[in-house]
């Protein structure tokens, strides 16, 4: 019995020693992580941008200007103007209402006439005589422009908006070609604006807009008889803190009717026949007058 217990103890000791010799040493923590990730696929996740807080997001949206809308209620009283024999110009009335219930903001009304090519010449002295210099051509220039507001335009919109919206008449005049070497394009633009202001075709009225209460407004613009015939466009702008909020556009068509239209069409489309008929009418009128006064 004692012999069996001794043999069992010797066998147990031998087995423990063999297990210690066969088992590998435990790997270090860094080596274990490397072994675990050696055969695995590594996926790198890009860093996500931090989400702005609600207050910062609202503040950023308030600072970013929104696109202007076209829901400004505005219109003109007459969309069709007839040019007859007693035509002496016409008056356009633009009216509307400010969509802001509190009446905040400034209304600006701009009435533009049809664009047409224009030539500007500068006089120069040669041999004691004043002669016209080389022509400078403008591809587009409004034949008429009137800007009406309730206060000065520079207090309503910033210079960039005035130039972009072509509320300045010089902004809409586009050159075609080059200018003489002794002058720049700005001087010819100023000359064009000055000449048309003198003719009454370009005007700015900072007190012409009437505010009638409850957001209602009205602007009356007088068009002279020397203004071009064609399609006019009435643009209404709503500014708030020098930022464009809303716009609206209306069209006014000025057309000849009756005998004036017939004579104009013959003069522009059939100039030869128009000249012959005019000459014959002049001869007939002279002959009839001479015959009448001879008999009397």
Image (cartoon, grey):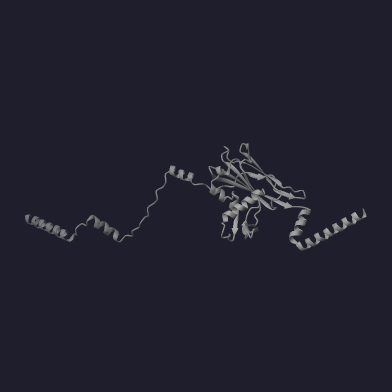
Q: Residue furthest right?
A: 295
Above or below for 279 versus 153: below
Residue 293 left/right relative to 191: right
- Residue 59 visible in the picture: yes
Q: Position of residue 247 (x, y in %)?
A: 59, 47
Residue 93 left/right relative to 101: right
Q: Residue furthest top?
A: 213
Q: Position of residue 218 (x, y in %)?
A: 65, 41
In the picture, residue 276 is in which quadrant?
bottom right
Q: Position of residue 32 (x, y in %)?
A: 25, 57
Q: For this rendering, which residue is in front, 32 or 270? A: 270
Q: Residue at x 58, y 45 (%)?
A: 246
- Residue 67 visible in the picture: no
Q: How many callouts does the rendering have?
A: 0
Q: Position of residue 202 (x, y in %)?
A: 64, 48
Q: Residue at x 58, y 54 (%)?
A: 187
Q: Residue at x 77, y 56 (%)?
A: 263
Q: For this rendering, which residue is in front, 44 or 185? A: 185
Q: Residue at x 59, y 58 (%)?
A: 175
Q: For this rendering, which residue is in front, 109 or 61? A: 109
Q: Residue furthest left?
A: 2
Q: Residue furthest bottom?
A: 272
Residue 30 left/right relative to 243: left
Above or below for 89 versus 269: above
- The image quadrant where one finds the N terminus is bottom left
């Amino acid at each position: 019995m004692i012999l069996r217990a001794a043999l069992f103890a010797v066998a147990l000791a031998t087995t423990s020693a063999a297990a210690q010799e066969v088992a590998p040493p435990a790997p270090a923590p860094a080596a274990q992580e490397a072994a675990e990730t050696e055969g695995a696929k590594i996926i790198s996740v890009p860093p996500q941008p931090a989400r702005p807080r609600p207050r910062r997001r609202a503040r950023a949206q308030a600072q970013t200007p929104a696109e202007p809308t076209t829901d400004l209620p505005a219109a003109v009283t007459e969309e069709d103007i007839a040019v007859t024999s007693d035509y002496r110009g016409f008056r356009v009335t633009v009216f509307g209402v400010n969509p802001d219930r509190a009446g905040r903001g400034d209304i600006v009304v701009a009435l533009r006439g049809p664009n047409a090519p224009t030539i500007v010449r500068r006089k120069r002295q040669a041999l004691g005589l004043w002669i016209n210099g080389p022509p400078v051509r403008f591809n587009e220039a409004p034949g008429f422009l009137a800007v009406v507001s309730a206060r000065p335009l520079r207090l309503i919109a910033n210079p960039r908006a005035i130039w972009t919206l072509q509320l300045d008449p010089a902004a809409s005049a586009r050159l075609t070609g080059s200018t003489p070497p002794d002058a720049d394009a700005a001087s010819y633009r100023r000359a064009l604006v000055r000449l048309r202001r003198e003719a009454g075709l370009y005007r700015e009225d900072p007190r012409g807009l009437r505010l009638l209460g409850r957001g209602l407004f009205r602007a009356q613009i007088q068009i002279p008889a020397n203004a071009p015939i064609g399609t006019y466009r009435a643009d209404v702008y709503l500014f708030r803190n020098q930022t464009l909020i809303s716009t609206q556009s209306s069209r006014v068509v000025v057309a000849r009717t009756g005998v004036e239209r017939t004579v104009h069409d013959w003069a522009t489309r059939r100039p030869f026949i128009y000249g012959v008929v005019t000459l014959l009418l002049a001869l007939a009128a002279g002959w009839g007058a001479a015959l009448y006064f001879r008999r009397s």
